[in-house]
Image (cartoon, helix red, strand yellow):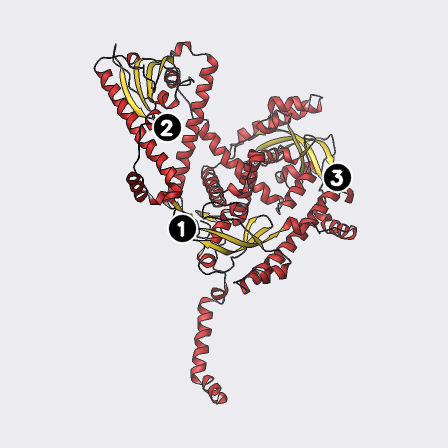
Amino acid sequence: MLQAMREKVMGVLGWIVIGLIIVTFALFGLGSYLQDKSRAYAARVNDVEITPRELQETYQQQRARMEQMLGDAFDPALIDEDKLKSRALEALIEKQLLLQASQEAGMAISDQLLAARIHAIPSLQVDGKFSDTVYRNMLTRQGLVAAEFEASVRAELQAQQLMNGLSQTTFVTAEEVDNAYRLQEQKRDFSYIVVAAEPFKAGIELSDEQIQAYYDQHKAEFTVPERVRLSYLRLNGDVLGEAVEVSEDDLLAHYEERKQSLLTREQRRASHILIQVEPGADAETVSKARAEAESLLQKIHAGEDFAELAKQHSDDPGSAAQGGDLGFFERGVMLPEFDETVFTMKTGDVSGPVKTQFGFHIIKLTGVHGSKIPTLEEVRAELVKELKQRRIDDMFYEQLELLTDTSYETPDSLAAAADALGLEIQTSDWITPDKGTGIGQYPKVRAAAFSDDVLEGGNNSEPVEVGPADAIVVRVEEREAAHPAPLEDVRDAIVSKLKHELAAEQAAAKGAELLQKLAAGESLEALKDQDYFTYRNAEAVTRAASGFDPEVAREAFRLQRPPEGGAQDKGIQLTSGDYAVIHLTAVVDGDPATMPENVRTQLTQVFENMRRAMMLSVLVDDLRSRAEIVIPEDTQ
C-alpha cells in the first residue's frame, strides 16, 4: 500500500508540486524563506539606522551617570529601565537629526581638530598626556576599532558645531533684562489671615450612617490590591564567580592571545603652523598663502621660536594656543599628505610648506614613541579581570540556558530546575502589581508575576534579568485576590477623612464671612482676634522672601495691582484644609537703575541659556517634523 502511495506521489502530480516549488524559489529566492524577519536596527532616521548596540551603549552611559550622580542613594530597583531606554533612544535620534542637518549645511571637522579632541579626553590621558596604550585598551574593552570611535567623536563634534552656531546667534536685550529685574525685585505689601481647620474638628460628630455612606461611595479607595507570594530561583554571576580561579598557564595563554591588540603602534608628536586656504580659492590667494608659509619657514630656520610663531600666525584654533602642538598620534590619523611628511622626519626636523585641503602646513617633529608590547606584569591585573569576567559570563549564560530549558520543560514546579543547577528554591514576601520588597522591588519581576501565563496559567516565568548576570525565575506560590477592605478595618481612616473635609468646609465658610466684612469696609487687622485665626502682615516682601506661608505668598504675587489707595482681596483653600484671606495693598517694581552689574550679567546668562534651549528645541522639533523616523515595535 505504501509503495502504491509513493508511486502516485511521484507521478504527474508530484512533479507539478516540485515544479511549483522550484519556480517559487527562483522568483523569490530561498533567502525570503530563511531570512530573519526581525529588525536589525533600534530606529531609522531618514536613511541612517541606529543600531541596537548604539542604543544599549547610550542606555548604559545614562545609567552610569545616574549612578555616579546619586552615589549611595542609587537604587536599581527604582529605575524604570523602559523609560531610561526610551530617553536614550530619543537622545540618539536627536543627535542623528542634528548630525544630518550639519552635513546638509556643509559643516565638517578637520582631522587635526578631531585628533586634538580625542587627545584632550581626560580618561585617555596618563599624567596629563594622551596615552595610546590607554586608548587601545579602551577600544578593546568596548569592542571598537579606532575608525568607529573616531567616526563617533567626529559626528559628535559636527552636531556640536551646528548647536554652537545656533547658540551664538542668541541674544537678550537690555530692556528684557530690565523687565526681568523689575519682576524679580518687585515688592508687595499684603496681610493675611489663615482660618485653621483643625479647631472645627472638635465640634464635628459623625453618625454611623454618614460613615457607612462614605464607605459605600468610596469603596474603590479602600480596595486591598491583589497580591501574591512567589517561589523563585535566582542565578547570579557574582555567586558563580566566587569559584572562578585563573591559573598562571591560562593567564600566559591569554596574554599571548592578546599581544597583538596590546601592541602600541608607533606614535609621533608634531607641532604645525597652518596658513589656511579656503577650498576653491583662486591662484593668487593660493600663491599668497604659500609665500606666507615659506616666509615663516625661513624665520624658523633663522632661529625664531616655532611655538611663538604658531601662536601669532597659525590659523588652526585648536593648536595655535599650544604653540602648534598636536600631541602624539599614530599613522593614519592625520591627512595623508601631513602623515607622509611626519613619518619620514627625524626628531627636531622642520618641514614644509606641506599642502593639504586646509592650506599650507609648516611641521616640526617633536617626539617619537616606538611600537611596544607591554609586559605581562604591566597588564596582569587587567588580563586576570578579563579572564574571570569571560568565564563568569560563559558560566552564567550556559546555566541561564539550562535554567530556561528546565523551568520551561517542567512548568508546574521549580524543583527540576533547582536540582539541575544546584540552586535553592526561595520564597518572597507578599507582592502587589505596584510594590514589594526583596525581589518584589524589581518592576520586571512584578510584571512577570502578574502576567497571564504565570498568574492564571500557573506556570513558571521565563528568566527575568534584573541586572548584569543576574536572573530570576518565579512562580506563584500563594494568591490573594483584590477585595474591598472591611469597614471595621478602615473606619478610623474614614472618620479622619470626613472630619478633615467637613472642617475644611467650615474654615472656608468662615473665610467667606471675613471677605464679606472686608468688602463692607472693615480692616483685616480688626478681624484677626479669634483663637483659630493666624494673622500676618507682610511689608515690602519680594518673591524670594521666606517666613510666610508659601501658598499664600505665591497667590499674593499673582493678584493684580490694587487701585490707587485701594486693595485686592482674595480667599484660597490651602492644601492643609485651612483657608486664607489675602489683603494686597501695594506693588512696587524693582528699579533697573539700581541693578548691580553682576546681577545684570547673571540675568543675561540665564535668559540666553533659556533662549538657547528653546531654539534648540524648536530646531529639533522642526527637523523631526521633516524627517522620516521609524521605530520598530520591538524597540518601543
- Name the disc covering residue 224, or none: none
Q: Is residue 537 positioned above or below 84 on the image?
A: above
The amino acid beneath tag 2 is Ser
Closer to us: 614 or 196 = 196
Q: Residue 573 falls in which quadrant of the image?
A: top left
- Name the disc covering residue 370, or none: 3
- Name the disc covering residue 482, or none: 1
Q: Name the residue under label 2.
A: 576
What is the count of numbered marks?
3
Q: Residue 164 location, x and y as percent?
A: 48, 30
Q: First in sequence, mark 2 or 3: give its number.
A: 3
Tell me the element at label 1. Answer: loop
The amino acid beneath tag 1 is Ala
At horizontal 46% and vertical 38% (from top left) the residue drawn is 98
At horizontal 71% and vertical 42% (from top left) the residue drawn is 264
Give the CA distance from mark 2 to mark 3: 74 Å
Task: Judge whether residue 278 can be spotted in this image.
Answer: yes
Tell me the element at label 3. Answer: loop
Task: Point out the frontmost of discs 1 and 3.
Answer: 1
